[in-house]
Amino acid sequence: MTIRLSEIEDTFLAKGSLDVSRFAEIEDKSMRVITPVSYELTVRKFDDLVTVQGPLECTMSITCSRCLEDFIFDLKAFLDIKLAPRTKNPRVSETELKSDDMDVYYYEGEEIDLEPFIYEEVLLNVPIRLICAEDCKGLCPVCGRNKNLEDCQCDTAARTLLGEKLKSFLN
């Protein structure tokens, strides 16, 4: 969604959805966006500074980090960014950034495309290691069976050379 700054007096409500096809280029095949990303963003303009805030929601299919089974994950995120004109961007090559400067993005012209910010916020809010359930048992490291579905009789006690030396030292 593209907003025109000249059409905003103080506040504007941007409501809509971002199509799933936008996420087709993600290289990580362990996650897939399966519903459009819905958003309801409040855009506020103070002189030439613009703030965008609001919730984002979508449903994803994600591979569990323990058992490698796919499961449904409902992502809920909150977009909160500040935008300033590119002319306010310091041109100095080495500048110490303050914590307030880290959340500022820059725009050019009279239009701002919100889609890249929504796309980025969705990807940043996907946890690195998702599991299907807290009590997920994962895969057997010996035979590879999913221990949530069936038990195996494999000996999973780790035997290392260091461990064996420690046992002989203690005995």
Image (spheres, rainbow, N blue to C red):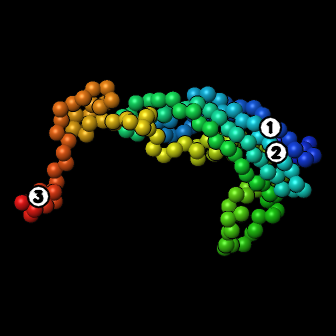
Q: Are marks 3 and 2 in contact (CB under 8 Å)?
A: no
Earlier residue among tags 2 and 1: 1
Q: Are marks 1 and 3 in contact (CB under 8 Å)?
A: no
The spot of residue 44 in percent (x, y) is 84, 48
Q: Is residue 18 left or right of residue 25?
A: right
- List the residue tagged with mark 1: 14
Residue at 64% x, 45% y: name it: 121
Earlier residue among tags 3 and 2: 2
Q: Amino acid at mark 1?
A: Ala
Farthest residue, direction top: 149
Observer-nearest of 42 and 111: 42
> Which label belongs to residue 43?
2
Q: Is residue 7 above or below residue 165?
A: above
Image quadrant occupied by the C terminus:
bottom left
Q: Is residue 75 above or below residue 84?
A: above
Circle 3 SS class: helix
Image quadrant occupied by the N terminus:
top right
Observer-nearest of 86 and 101: 101
The spot of residue 137 in percent (x, y) is 33, 36
Q: Amino acid at mark 2?
A: Val
Farthest residue, direction front: 171
Circle 2 SS class: strand
Q: Are marks 2 and 1 in contact (CB under 8 Å)?
A: yes
Corner quadrant of residue 142: top left
Q: Is residue 126 above or below residue 143?
A: below
Within 10 Å of disc 1 (Cα), the crowding (few <14, some 14-19, many 20+) is some
> Which label belongs to residue 150?
none
Structural distance between the alpha carbons of marks 2 and 1: 7 Å
The spot of residue 106 in percent (x, y) is 76, 56
Which is in the foreground here, disc 3 or disc 2? 3
- List the residue tagged with mark 3: 167
Residue at 70% x, 40% y: name it: 55
